[in-house]
Amino acid sequence: MINKGDEVIIPAPYWVTYIELVKLNEGVNVIIPTTVDSDFKITPAQLEAAITPKTRAFLFSSPSNPTGSVYTKAELKAFADIFAKHPNIIVISDEIYEHIVYGIKHESIAQFPDIKERVVVVNGVSKAFAMTGYRIGYIAAPLWLAKAANKLQGQYTSGPCSVSQIASVTALNAPLDTVQAMVTQFEKRRNLVLSMLAEIPGVKTSKPDGAFYVFPDISSFFGKSDGTVTINNADDMGLFILSNAFTGVVSGEAFGAPECIRISYAASEADLTKSLTRIKDALATLK
């Protein structure tokens, strides 16, 4: 899809691999920044302004890793209307967290007829079915593109093992009862994390509607110190929390949001409570 000099529009924060894939193909990343105040979502105006004659693709995720933000049907329709005017642009929609949403319905940008034949949906069994070790991903795409991907796949990895394939078919055809039970627990953990983060002065969060991450803005701590360490960026904050709260968080730097950190709540409520209590105590030492 991407040749040297072709542009790929990517909203930030983004999954860390996205920009590197574009670089590998000598493409140009066109990043649209967002903030916690916009729920980490871009607007149609921002999208339209980023499009140039060199734009070849738009790559995004909903629900998002790292933010958990989810685009609504109306928001996606507005994007689709823009892409309908630009027939050379292919939309790559990463929907790996499709089933992990809270109180809303997941919507795909592939549902709009005007652009359906230019949409690639990326998915897999790792998240919703907790089958990370099976290493199964898949796409829904126009036939010409799927055939091209198949040629590359055959040379890169030959193919996934038959055991993983059969297990994945079973998962995809099974009722979603167990998935929904898991999502219910994730929602409780999300609410716990949000409530505890709200008690920490200087931490700013949005309410994620999907995935299992919270992506707080911690930039209010930049320049502060505990007397030994000064926090200059999210990388410093990640190391400070690791050293002082014995908890691992991920810097937002690699996600294109250096003012944030990513917290996963794919852990027990007991561990989350212990960790967030420690984080709160550690951050209170920064003056």
Image: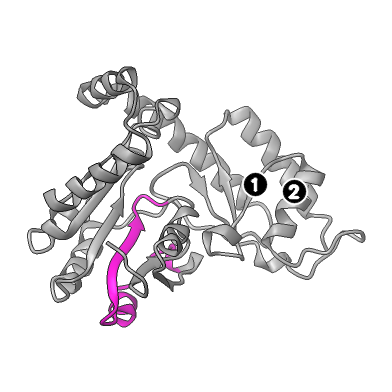
Label 2 environment density (alpha carbons within 10 Å; few <14, some 14–19, many ≥20): some
* Quadrant showing the C terminus: bottom right
Which residues, given as a range, are shown in magenta? 38-64
Q: Secondary structure at mark 1?
A: loop
Q: Residue furthest front?
A: 155
Q: Position of residue 204 (x, y in %)?
A: 58, 61
Query: How did the renderer colour the structure?
Result: one colour
Q: Secondary structure at mark 2?
A: helix
Identify the amino acid type marked 2: Ile
- In percent of the image, x 41 and y 63: which residue is there? 22
- Is 151 magenta? The answer is no
**Quadrant of the image occupied by residue 78:** bottom left
- In percent of the image, x 45 and y 26: which residue is there? 133
Residue denoted by label 2: 241
Report the Cα–Cα distance between label 2 and label 1: 8 Å
**Quadrant of the image occupied by residue 50:** bottom left
The residue closer to the viewer here, 272 or 156, is 156
Residue denoted by label 1: 249
